[in-house]
Amino acid sequence: MSAQARPHRGTIFVEDAAVLAHEAFPGGQYVLRLAAPRAAAAATPGSFVHLNCGPGLPMRRPFSILRTDRTAGTIEILYKVVGVGTAELARRVAGETMSCLGPIGRGFAPQAERPRALMVGGGVGIPPLVFLAEALAAQGGTWQPLVLMGSELPFPFATTPSRTAVPGMPADATHAMSQLEAIGVPSRLASLAGLAGCHRGYVTGLAEAWLAAQPRTALADVEIFSCGPEPMLRATAALARRFGLPCQVSLEENMACAVGGCAGCAVLVHTADGPAMKRVCVDGPVFDAASVFTE
């Protein structure tokens, strides 16, 4: 089969990535920075890397990219320890090298005619939305990203009281991600764990409050982007249907090969030609929410 028929061929690289920094946060959460210049140069918001987490582990694990620095040739990932692979990854220290396969997948594709990008992220689904928000902010122009993040663990980044007013937000949503605040991108946080400055509720509740407060004419400029656990994605897709908005979701599935060979990550997607099984790794991980969550 030709490379044209498989567009991911020639765009995924294998490189030995040096661990530059590895910071631990409460709740078994970590931010890992790697020197991976080929992945950094080609990554787009929503793409991911497949890492060999440690010696003796034959299977790689997929991780969304939090941000890249193309000049420095680095990528960052945020992850939580949930099993053997991530527990082994947490033992990696600066100076070590690990095999990095990436960037992989079809990322988010914002529509310029809908510059008000509403991003809804939960837990370890937050990284690709931060990547997208920073990319849109760097483009400038008419883009107006708003990032809403939910977690039941302390957030694995610094937060700060926001100086940016966001009409329509519940009064208890006062804090923002410091890094986004510093570049002028508004954000708000939600949690049921009683975290300071967070709306007490689900992040989809924040999204619903903001959408309900927008004039009908303003909604014509809104597009939703979401990544997180399936119940949150399903609720976000329902919001998009209710308000008549386009919505892109990034799915999370177990992946063996991550390059489309094993089809172990296939999900049912409703297409113009009827139902079809699509591979999350190379056909996604980003899909039209309406094609995945039909009710």
Image (spheres, rainbow, N blue to C red):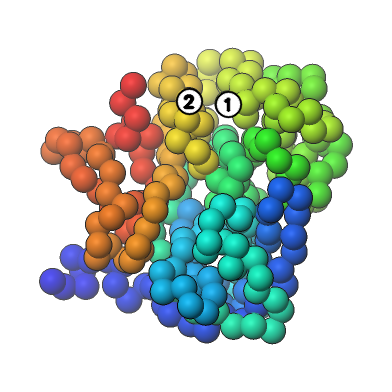
Vertical arrangement, residue 292 with respect to residue 97, above or below: above
Q: Say what amino acid the circle numbered 2 marks.
A: Ala
Residue 161, x across and y down, in percent: 86, 37
Please name the residue shown 43% across and 22% down the image. Answer: 238
Please name the residue shown 37% across and 72% down the image. Answer: 11
Q: Secondary structure at mark 2?
A: helix
Residue 268, x across and y down, in percent: 25, 40
Residue 105, quarter of picture:
bottom left
Vertical arrangement, residue 228 with respect to residue 290, above or below: below
In this figure, which residue is indicated by the disc labeled 1? 204
Q: Say the numbered circle drawn on residue 121.
A: none
Please name the residue shown 27% across and 49% down the image. Answer: 266
| Front position in the image: 251 or 145 | 251
Contact, mark 1 vs mark 2 (Cβ under 8 Å): yes
Please name the residue shown 21% across and 45% down the image. Answer: 277
Vertical arrangement, residue 78 with respect to residue 192, above or below: below
In this figure, which residue is indicated by the disc labeled 2? 235
Q: Is residue 102 visible?
A: no
Q: Would residue 134 be found to the left or right of residue 59 on screen?
A: right
Badge 1: few (under 14), some or many (20 or more) residues near its Cα, within 10 Å?
Answer: many
Residue 73, x across and y down, in percent: 61, 77
Residue 228, x across and y down, in percent: 52, 41
| Front position in the image: 216 or 152 | 152
